[in-house]
Amino acid sequence: MPTKPEILKRETVMRSRLFRADQVHLRFSNGEERHYEKLVGGGRGAVLIVPLLNDDTFLLVKEYAVGLEDYHLACPKGAIDEGETLLDAANRELKEEVGYGARKLTFLKKVHLSPSYMEHGINIVIAQDLYPERLEGDEPEPIQVQELPIADLPDFCLRADVCEGRSIAALFLVREWLAKPENRL
């Protein structure tokens, strides 16, 4: 295992309402020095929920993404609020965005979209044994909920309106997780 680089200096080079970028000056074990920039995480983290209507059907949300300037289908997700556990946040977001709560929530894995320059990660949570319950959320318009048979996952991910890498990864990870008999309801 290589020795981690030494951080010689770190400074914030940009800050917005949502993001902070730091420049990090590193010295590697071979003496080489480099400057990198990275987006720094904030808040208490975030959750991405894979709701299972049953062992064969995912629930997804269709909502507007300003980064795309268009609508897309993805897993529900959101920030962990102050005082919430990861699983509390997952159940709240599920109720706000999908209109269901879950009697069984399972943390699966934390993933990072671009670890070479982003500190941000998201916690994947599986929601099972759903029941109808809606909480008012902070979305500017009603979110559409769509069912996806797990068997249709490969073709579904090739659609133009399915482009969020975290959701695609989460759906495939959960499909594999469900392949183990002990994980099915």
Image: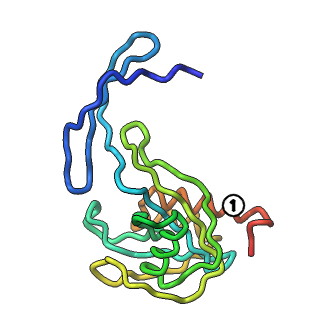
Left of 60 or right of it: where is 103?
right
**Relative to 39, residue 60 above or below:** below
Name the quarter where the C terminus is drawn.
bottom right
The picture places residue 8, in percent across and down from the top left corner, at 33, 21
The picture places residue 41, in percent across and down from the top left corner, at 36, 48
Q: Label 1: few (<14), some or many (≥20) within 10 Å?
A: some
Left of 92 or right of it: where is 102?
right
The picture places residue 106, in percent across and down from the top left corner, at 63, 65
Work out which residue is located at the far top of the displayed protein and give it: 31
Q: Quadrant of residue 105?
A: bottom right
Query: Label 1 sits on what residue type?
Result: Trp
Residue at 54% across / 52% down in the picture? 110
The picture places residue 182, in percent across and down from the top left corner, at 79, 66
Circle 1 is placed at which residue position? Answer: 177
Q: Quadrant of residue 132?
A: bottom right
**Relative to 169, residue 35 above or below:** above
Left of 40 or right of it: where is 181?
right
Residue at 40% across / 44% down in the picture? 119
Residue at 32% across / 77% down in the picture? 138
Residue at 41% across / 36% down in the picture? 116
Secondary structure under tag 1 reads helix
Work out which residue is located at the far bottom of the displayed protein and give it: 132
Which coloring applies here? rainbow
**Relative to 7, residue 89 above or below:** below
Name the quarter where the N terminus is drawn.
top right
Count of numbered badges drawn on the protein: 1
**Nearest to the observer: residue 91 or residue 143:** 91
**Nearest to the observer: residue 152 or residue 177:** 177
Work out which residue is located at the far right of the displayed protein and give it: 181
